[in-house]
Image (spheres, rainbow, N blue to C red):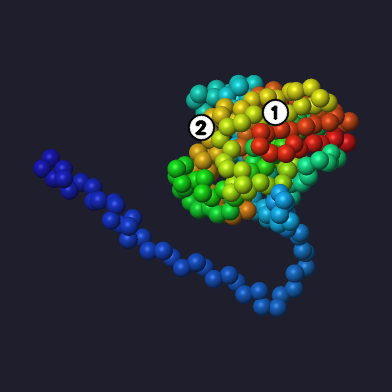
């Protein structure tokens, strides 16, 4: 009993001492020839002629309470969760144009999810929400297109969602708008209409986890880096599209994103 004070050595010291390891040197490419070359993926930066190269596409699930409920979960209890889309799922859609979006294979229930997208210019591990916004380069309107029947089928079998969430071209996005010009998007109307009829309508304030909180949570699981995109979740009333439908996505302060399903 008397030895109680000795019980646990202070951990703080060793943490402070933990020396930074030098980064592993990249293997020398020497003169090895690249036999398969994959084009980088870019999102244009509005009004600049500049391009933002995409490293990874992170997406948060069920981040608006009413959408969480419509997907059958309890928004009050559930911690945030994330999935990824392949980088080349990006489909750039320029303002003032209606881009053709291919209805993908295998599904009979292809659905829209309008989302605010945050783009990172820097990153790190264990970023605190209070420090998170300084890593954001800009914002865009995006769509997390989803083969809902396949996603739910896999979910029910406790298998990965990828086939539902990672269809080719399944991540339409408008040009990025620099934070320096627009500020951060912590509030403002977000909506989606199909053939002129409003289907989804909400406000960014209804996110359960703010973009800064999403960065905090994500950076506990992954080292975030410049080039990462975060699709920040969709409000309620997701629904199916048919070939021939015209989708118009709106977020206050950003230009509309318009798609024609073909
Ligand atoms: Mn989504």
Vertical placement of residue 196 versus 6, above or below? above
Numbered label attached to residue 111: none
User: Which residue extends farthest left?
Assistant: 2
Residue at 61%, 27% (x, y): give it: 203
Foreground pick, 55 / 174: 174
Apparent side of residue 167 relative to residue 52 in the rendered image (left or right)? right
| Residue at numbered disc 1 | 191
Quarter holding the N terminus is top left
Foreground pick, 225 / 94: 94
Vertical placement of residue 81 versus 23, above or below? above
Query: Ligand 1 closer than 8 Å to the CB at disc 1?
Result: no
The answer, for residue 222, to whether it is visible in the render is: yes
Vertical placement of residue 101 versus 112, above or below? below
Apparent side of residue 247 relative to residue 65 in the rendered image (left or right)? right
User: Which residue extends farthest bottom?
Assistant: 31
Q: Position of residue 18 (x, y in %)?
A: 36, 60
The answer, for residue 153, to whether it is visible in the render is: no
Q: Position of residue 103 (x, y in %)?
A: 84, 36
Q: Position of residue 158 (x, y in %)?
A: 63, 32
Residue 248 is drawn in which quadrant? top right
Residue at 75%, 23% (x, y): give it: 198
Residue at 29%, 52% (x, y): give it: 12
| Residue at numbered disc 2 | 79
Residue at 66%, 33% (x, y): give it: 252
**Which element type, helix, strand or loop, lies under badge 2?**
loop
Residue 230 is drawn in which quadrant? top right
Spatial separation of the CA atoms under disc 2 and disc 1:
25 Å
Would you call the spot at circle 2 few (<14 residues within 10 Å), some (14-19), or many (20 or more)? Answer: few
Would you call the spot at circle 1 few (<14 residues within 10 Å), some (14-19), or many (20 or more)? Answer: many
Q: Earlier in the sequence, mark 2 or mark 1?
A: 2
Foreground pick, 126 / 93: 93
């Amino acid at each position: 009993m008397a030895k109680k004070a000795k019980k646990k050595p202070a951990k703080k010291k060793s943490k402070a001492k933990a020396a930074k390891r030098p980064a592993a040197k990249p293997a020398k490419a020497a003169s090895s020839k690249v036999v398969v070359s994959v084009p980088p993926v870019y999102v244009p930066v509005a009004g600049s002629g500049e391009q933002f190269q995409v490293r990874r596409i992170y997406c948060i699930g069920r981040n608006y309470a009413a959408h969480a409920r419509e997907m059958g979960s309890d928004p009050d209890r559930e911690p945030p969760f994330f999935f990824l889309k392949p980088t080349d799922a990006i489909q750039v859609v320029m303002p003032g144009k209606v881009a053709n979006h291919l209805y993908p294979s295998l599904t009979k229930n292809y659905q829209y999810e309008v989302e605010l997208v945050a783009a990172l210019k820097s990153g790190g591990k264990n970023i605190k929400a209070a420090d998170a916004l300084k890593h954001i380069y800009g914002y865009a309107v995006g769509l997390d297109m989803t083969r809902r029947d396949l996603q739910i089928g896999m979910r029910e079998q406790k298998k990965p969602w990828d086939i539902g969430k990672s269809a080719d071209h399944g991540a339409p996005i408008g040009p990025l708008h620099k934070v320096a010009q627009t500020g951060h998007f912590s509030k403002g109307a977000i909506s989606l209409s199909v053939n002129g009829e409003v289907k989804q309508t909400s406000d960014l304030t209804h996110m359960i986890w703010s973009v800064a909180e999403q960065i905090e949570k994500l950076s506990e699981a992954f080292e975030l880096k410049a080039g990462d995109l975060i699709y920040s979740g969709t409000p309620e009333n997701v629904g199916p599209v048919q070939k021939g439908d015209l989708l118009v996505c709106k977020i206050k302060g950003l230009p509309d994103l318009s798609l024609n399903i073909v």
